[in-house]
Amino acid sequence: MKIGVCQVCMSDTVLITGVTGYLGSNLASVLLACGYRVIALKRKLSSLHRVEAFSSSIVMYDIEGLDFDIPFKAHGKIDIIIHTATCYGRKNESVYEVFAANTDFPLRLLDAGSRAGVELFINTDTSLDKFLNLYSFSKNQLLRWGRYFSMHGKIQFLNIKLEHFYGPNDDPIKFTTFIIDSCLDNTQELKLTKGEQRRDFVYIKDVLSAYLVLLEKRESFKSDFMEFDVGSGGSISIREFVESIHHLTASKTHLVFGAIPYREGEVMGSKANIEPLLKLGWRCEHTLMEGLKLTIHRSKR
């Protein structure tokens, strides 16, 4: 996915996790286009369909049974780790499986990277409350480890609190994709909550450009621990969001708001504070309607 011409062409080496996922694959693609050297970690059984176009340009390691020191010894200096891999717990994973994916695995990588002299660890975090579910709780545990490592001068840790990103060809289980697919398919009925909760939805290209800006400006960071919100900076109710998709797709699907209760601890409002990113020169280039139109156009049957 192209997001425009990079302002600078880099020669740094980046190790990225979750490269076969939606965010990771798009990020790897733009990093390569900007001249970064990319090394990737993935699961052995992960589908490679998202990376087929550029798989020959990156080095990939399967994480099962991997000695995490090996990539750092085999490729000379690795400058940056970008952690995008995650387990949402949507497939009935056990507590340990969620912990292993979101805390144990990246912690082992953080430790190996710090010992190998990696300068920066960029963690892709969530804006959700840490006690909402296993996913957010396990992500918060890694954040605490990141603070510890940075406080003790082991590595610079940059935490990205990512809002609800979306775009063409995202995973079908994601909320936005599910709603778009259901409306395009004219599913007879779609049961939803009341939809009063407000969310910050941000288009994938704007997310990618935020990562690139943070990489470009990293030498100006004064602290070994920093956090940035990544989102549009605005919010919309879930009901308005779904109704917008319903209208843009000219769908015949019957929307039943209030058929599903809110989950326990439901976050009723979430919006990114993008002021720190704006000061670095980043801009959110796509309005919600623009992003949805692009996504729907690419998703049409």
Image (tube, rainbow, N blue to C red):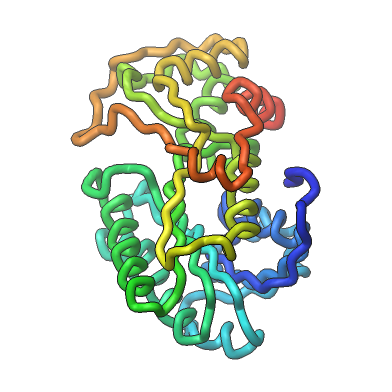
Tell me which residue sits at (76%, 52%) in the image: 6
Image quarter where the C terminus lies is top right
User: What residue is shown at x 64% (from left), y 53% (from top)?
Assistant: 212
User: Percent position (x, y) of residue 118?
Assistant: 53, 78
Q: Where does the image place residue 188, in percent across and percent down from the top left? A: 47, 15
Identify the residue at image location x=48%, y=82%.
68
- Front position in the image: 89 or 69: 69
Which residue is found at the position 60% from the left and 34% from the top? 284
Between 246 and 108, the one nearer to me in the picture: 108
Q: Is residue 111 above or below residue 217?
A: below
Question: Quick one: 289 or 61, which is closer to the camera?
Answer: 289
Q: Is residue 21 above or below residue 162?
A: below
Q: At which x and y percent is residue 202?
A: 54, 34
| Residue 258 falls in image quadrant | top left
User: Residue 65: x percent and y percent?
Assistant: 46, 82
Q: Quadrant of residue 95?
A: bottom left
For residue 291, side relative to residue 158 (left or right): right
Residue 97 in view (yes/no): no
What residue occupies the far left of the structure in this picture?
264
